[in-house]
Image: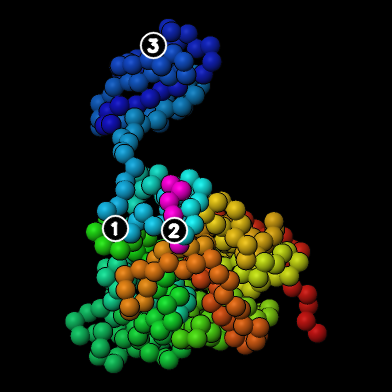
Amino acid sequence: MPGSIIVGFKAHVSAKGRSGVLGAVDARPTKRFAQIDSTVVSVSPANTSWTIRTLEQDPRVAYAEPNFVLHAADVPNDPSFPQEWGLDNTGQQVNWTSGTPDADIDAKEAWSVSTGSPDVTVAVIDTGVDVAHPDLAQNIWINQGENCAGCRTNGIDDDGDGYVDDWRGWDFVNGDNDPTDDNGHGTHVAGTIAAAGNNGIGITGVTWNSKIMPLKFLGSDGSGSTEEAISAILYARAKGVPILNNSWGGGDFSQAVQDAIELTDQSGELFVAAAGNDFTNTDADPFWPSSYDTPNILSVGAGDQFDRRAWFSNYGPRSVDLSAPGTNIYSTCAATSLSVTLPSERPSVNANPELVRRGPAAGSTSTTPSAVQAPRRGSSLRPPVQS
């Protein structure tokens, strides 16, 4: 509320003392909360910020804060939103399973603060994305360096980044500028993160408006090479993307991949990674890339509709940072339809160290774009020195 401030006083400040504090900044009391020793005051709207700063410097004041404008929790009009138990679990039945009410991420409560910003981009490093999907198209990232008149298809590297006509991401599998999903996994993950919200169709993402950068390094069979993974990571970093989503893993320890991730840490990006789906304690048996000892890695396991760890999810008090909804996830489907539910099944992980295969089928590594600081891992997670 412009010109309205709530002032809390420290214990034992007398009525005369409170009056003196408020009078010194020309603040007029309008309501008193005796139970919490605070007072609502009115000031000139133009002086609100100055008044708060001045009051905070007074030793008799515990706090001074704006009288914030609050809103009812936003509920999107997307018809399949009731199927998205991970956002709002009412105990509804999804894929023949009724879960525990409120075993969710409290998305509606978060949306009363923000439904996401188009200024935040999430790189989906995966099997690609159905960029024409009606619930995703408006939230696909556009490379402004390749977006001038005729630049998208002129066969010239207009922005000088080494990739020709990469106006909406890149396909590292086929070496071209069409990161279209031919597997389905990346599209499902992208919808969980940022399907357009409140647009009257399909589902809604955790963030309604943020942008998705499609970076395809996994092919139609869900596998790809270390080389292509590194290329995608470095591409996202070069574009200044703040969040890199990595729902994949497997193979052996790779110093090259760790070096690439460490570069993203140095430039301040958040590297969100699947904890893996082998029902394994990754403190003892690491899963790459989520187990690399790099501070910006957020390792995410899968939870179910009952607020329990999904039966297949990897775990580890030092190597897994948190869990997110990861079973029976209703999200966007590549090419064929608006949305599909992926059941609680454990995808396989290719053991070939030269290949990596996709992670949680339910896109359980998705995270709300926000300022998140991943906990620093302990040195015990560093791989042994190779001879």
Residue 360 occupies quadrant: bottom right
Rate crowding at label 3 as few (under 14), some (14 to 19) or many (20 or more) other CA atoms within 10 Å. Answer: some
Residue shown at the point (31%, 48%) measured from the top left: 75
Foreground pick, 152 / 157: 152
Q: Are marks 3 and 1 in contact (CB under 8 Å)?
A: no
- Callout in the foreground (3, 1): 1
Q: Position of residue 206 (x, y in %)?
A: 40, 57
Question: Which residues are drawn in magenta?
Answer: 90-95
Residue 379 visible in this rendered orientation of the protein: yes
Foreground pick, 202 / 177: 202
Name which residue type carries label 3.
Answer: Ser
| 212 on left or right of 365 | left
Separation (CA) of disc 2 from disc 1: 14 Å
Q: Position of residue 203 (x, y in %)?
A: 33, 61
Name which residue type carries label 2.
Answer: Val
Residue shown at the point (43%, 75%) measured from the top left: 186
Does 93 lie within the magenta span? yes
Which numbered disc, 3 or 2, marks the residue that appears first in the sequence?
Answer: 3
**Residue designated by label 1:** 79
**Residue designated by label 2:** 94
The image's mark for residue 19 is 3
Find numbered disc 3 in the image and state the secondary structure of the residue it sits on. Answer: helix
Foreground pick, 117 / 330: 330
